[in-house]
Image (cartoon, helix red, strand yellow):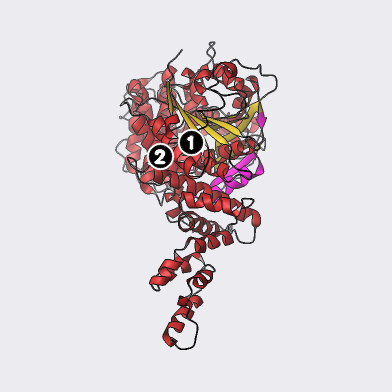
């Protein structure tokens, strides 16, 4: 593997964070270092002239039906390099790569070649190149070329180990692209909540991302509830309620005694009639009762978060409200170039109207909501490669879970790549943009304290896999793998200029009596269809 | 480590008329065992029936937990009640505190000597323990508790 120098641009993590990509470039013989555009132009000229001499070798391989072999052409190669590099602040200075481009390209695309690729990383680069070319073809609407390229990718994958590493990820992406071309509707089919449950649970066990989210949010909530007697937590995606036992326990051990706790859990309705929310509520109530915390639970079943209305949450006067959103807000976003306002804005405004003492937001730190497909694909390629990488490194001991956890990620990735319009719900945006949105809704940032940071660090050191890192940026914590941030956690509270809402006066299931009750018969069930 | 064990055995051999047999006084035995480390305590359960009973005493494990990870700021009786409700100190140590201490030591960040680290480890242990207890509560109809599996799996410390 070639040696390389890598310079960090301190202000922009994406430059330093795409170390994987740099490593792959280096494997192809590129020396990556910061330089000015002039050098880049020179480098590209060099590349051009080197590749021009290779034109003779560019006989169109029989595998590809069409004559024009776009992806082989030097200008596409540099365009590819360009589109990647335009995302980085440091420009690459490519040398004539070893081996020279001609034989490199020819080797990849010649049919029937017995792959004697000694270097896995070499194959990795070729796979990326194939995937990018295929995605470009999809972007241009050339389905024929795209599917041919995907076949090439799969052919290459048969030579490369696809049990781990770049091979496996490339396989997933090839499948996703194939799905996009031929049957995008099947990708949009939502699986049953029961399957979602299993996938979620395995993802929870196999890697620290969800645990990090829960523990960090809990710490912020705990600190916000300091001194409060009656507290109300609203969870926008209850799932199994795994986040809350730790909070209940921490409140039980609070010096001065526990407050009266209410939890309102939002979740999708189950098609087979099973009342998941109620079951989880019962379980939480049992736990709370055993540690002597006054507890009440309420379930709100809603297919989409935008269907929920504030009156369903029944926020009472005088209680401190915490709103918790783990990987939920991005589902409310729309296409950025659409004129119509996305559901997120109205949801955020009524959340702010609840005047929450704390709003905890955990989101993926990625830009997967760009309108252009190629941009999105490129981002997703690097983001999910890093995620899968981290799963693999930590998955040695719990192999079964890791495999299922990968399916969880794979589905997410498929949604980003294959779906469009309302079917695409995985519209991740980076924290900076969330900060702007939340600020517009009238929410002020609350710095996550040092205890959250220390706790996160300690949690991560429990996980095998040396690459996890927690960083603090502007009072928000991000969890990353090898310096690429993947998840960000932040907390907010209502600003002073938010107008007082009507919800607080109308709903009030009277602050006194029945709400504050430990027993299970307090589990209320509200169907949240659009009102 | 094995001194208390050896002492007990020796005394039994010499037996009557003089010599104090530690097995005559379970409370004293508990006091002694409470000073052992986790592994030794588990091993001591195999010595004899009495030792098995005494070594499973909650107070012994509570002493062990508090020695390693003092729950900073929480009142003793309050913590005791909560831990008891969640499954007890023995379970807490075996499922959470023990593996966490091992992992942290293996990762090069031992908790001993740092109060802040000990407090953080205590908080973390209790949080994880509460999740495990929660899963156990809901086991009927669902899969077995598995949230702590990541602690039990082998760590690659190469």
Image point 49% across, 26% down: which residue?
Answer: A376
Q: Which residue is farthest front? A: A513
- Farthest residue in the right direction? A496
Q: Is residue B47 visible?
A: yes
- Residue at 43%, 56% (x, y): give it: B154
Q: Earlier in the sequence, mark 1 or mark 2?
A: 2
Residue A470 magenta-drawn? yes
Q: Which residue is mark 2?
A: A201
Q: Which residue is mark 1?
A: A518
Task: Reply above or below: A33 against B2.
Answer: above
Question: Separation of disc 1 and disc 2 at Cα?
Answer: 27 Å
Residue B37 position within the rendered picture, expressed as x and y whole percent measured from the top left: 52, 67
Q: Residue at x 64, y 40 (%)?
A: A472
User: What is the span of residues highlighted in magenta in the rendered image?
Assistant: A445-472
Category of crowding for the residue at label 2, using alpha-carbon neighbours closer than 10 angstroms: few (below 14), some (14–19), many (at least 20):
many
Q: Mark 1, residues whose alpha carbon is within 10 Å: few (<14), some, or many (≥20)?
A: many
The residue under the point 60% across, 44% down is: A254
What's the mark number on residue A278? none
Task: Kindly indicate whether the residues beneath marks 1 and 2 are on one polypeptide chain.
Answer: yes
């Amino acid at each position: 593997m070639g040696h390389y120098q890598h310079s960090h641009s301190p202000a922009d993590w994406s430059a330093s964070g795409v170390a994987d990509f740099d490593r792959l470039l280096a494997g192809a013989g590129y020396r990556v270092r910061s330089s000015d555009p002039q050098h880049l132009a020179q480098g590209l000229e060099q590349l051009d002239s080197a590749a021009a001499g290779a034109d003779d070798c560019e006989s169109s391989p029989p595998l590809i039906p069409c004559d024009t072999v776009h992806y082989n052409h030097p200008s596409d190669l540099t365009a590819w390099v360009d589109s990647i590099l335009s995302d980085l602040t440091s420009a690459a200075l490519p040398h004539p790569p070893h081996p020279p481009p001609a034989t490199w390209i020819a080797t990849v695309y010649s049919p029937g070649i017995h792959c004697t690729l000694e270097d896995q990383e070499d194959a990795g680069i070729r796979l990326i190149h194939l995937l990018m070319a295929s995605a470009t073809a999809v972007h241009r609407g050339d389905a024929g070329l795209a599917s041919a390229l995907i076949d090439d990718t799969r052919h290459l994958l048969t030579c490369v180990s696809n049990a781990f590493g770049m091979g496996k990820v490339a396989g997933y992406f090839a499948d996703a692209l194939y799905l996009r071309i031929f049957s995008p509707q099947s990708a949009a089919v939502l699986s049953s909540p029961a399957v979602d449950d299993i996938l979620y649970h395995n993802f929870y066990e196999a890697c620290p991302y969800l645990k990090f989210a829960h523990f960090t949010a809990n710490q912020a909530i705990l600190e916000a509830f300091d001194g409060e007697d009656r507290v109300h937590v609203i969870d926008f995606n209850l799932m199994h309620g795994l986040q809350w036992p730790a909070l209940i326990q921490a409140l039980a051990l609070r010096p001065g005694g526990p407050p009266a706790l209410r939890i309102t859990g939002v979740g999708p309705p189950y098609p087979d009639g099973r009342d998941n929310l109620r079951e989880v509520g019962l379980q939480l109530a049992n736990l709370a009762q055993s540690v002597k915390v006054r507890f009440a639970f309420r379930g709100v079943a809603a297919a989409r978060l935008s269907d929920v209305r504030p009156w369903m949450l029944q926020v009472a006067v005088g209680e401190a409200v915490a709103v918790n959103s783990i990987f939920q807000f991005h589902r409310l976003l729309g296409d950025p170039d659409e004129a119509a306002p996305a559901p997120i804005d109205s949801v955020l405004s009524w959340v702010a109207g609840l005047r929450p003492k704390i709003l905890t937001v955990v989101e993926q730190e990625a830009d997967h909501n760009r309108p252009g497909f190629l941009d999105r694909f490129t981002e997703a390629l690097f983001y999910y490669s890093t995620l899968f990488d981290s799963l693999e490194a930590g998955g040695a001991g719990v192999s079964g879970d890791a495999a299922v956890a990968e399916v969880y990620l794979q589905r997410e990735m498929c949604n980003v790549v294959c779906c469009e319009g309302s079917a695409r719900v995985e519209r991740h945006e980076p924290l900076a943009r969330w900060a702007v949105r939340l600020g517009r809704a009238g929410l002020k940032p609350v710095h996550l304290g040092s205890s959250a940071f220390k706790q996160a660090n300690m949690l991560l050191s429990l996980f095998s896999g040396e690459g996890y890192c927690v960083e603090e940026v502007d009072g928000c914590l991000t969890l990353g793998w090898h310096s690429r941030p993947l998840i960000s956690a932040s907390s907010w509270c209502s600003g002073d200029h938010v107008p007082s809402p009507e919800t607080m006066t109308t709903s009030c299931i009277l602050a006194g009596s029945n709400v504050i009750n430990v027993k299970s018969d307090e589990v209320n069930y509200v169907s949240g269809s659009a009102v | 480590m094995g001194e208390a064990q050896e002492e007990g055995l020796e005394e039994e051999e010499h037996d009557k008329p003089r010599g104090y047999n530690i097995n005559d006084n379970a409370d004293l035995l508990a006091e002694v065992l409470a000073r052992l480390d986790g592994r030794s305590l588990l091993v001591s359960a195999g010595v004899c029936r009495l030792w098995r009973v005494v070594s499973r005493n909650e107070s012994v494990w509570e002493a062990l937990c508090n020695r390693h990870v003092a729950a900073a700021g929480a009142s003793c009786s309050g913590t005791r009640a909560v831990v008891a409700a969640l499954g007890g100190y023995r379970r807490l140590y075996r499922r959470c505190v023990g593996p966490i201490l091992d992992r942290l030591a293996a990762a090069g960040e031992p908790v001993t000597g740092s109060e802040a680290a000990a407090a953080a480890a205590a908080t973390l242990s209790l949080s994880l323990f509460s999740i495990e207890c929660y899963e156990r509560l809901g086991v009927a109809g669902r899969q077995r508790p598995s949230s702590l599996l990541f602690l039990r799996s082998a760590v690659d410390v190469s």
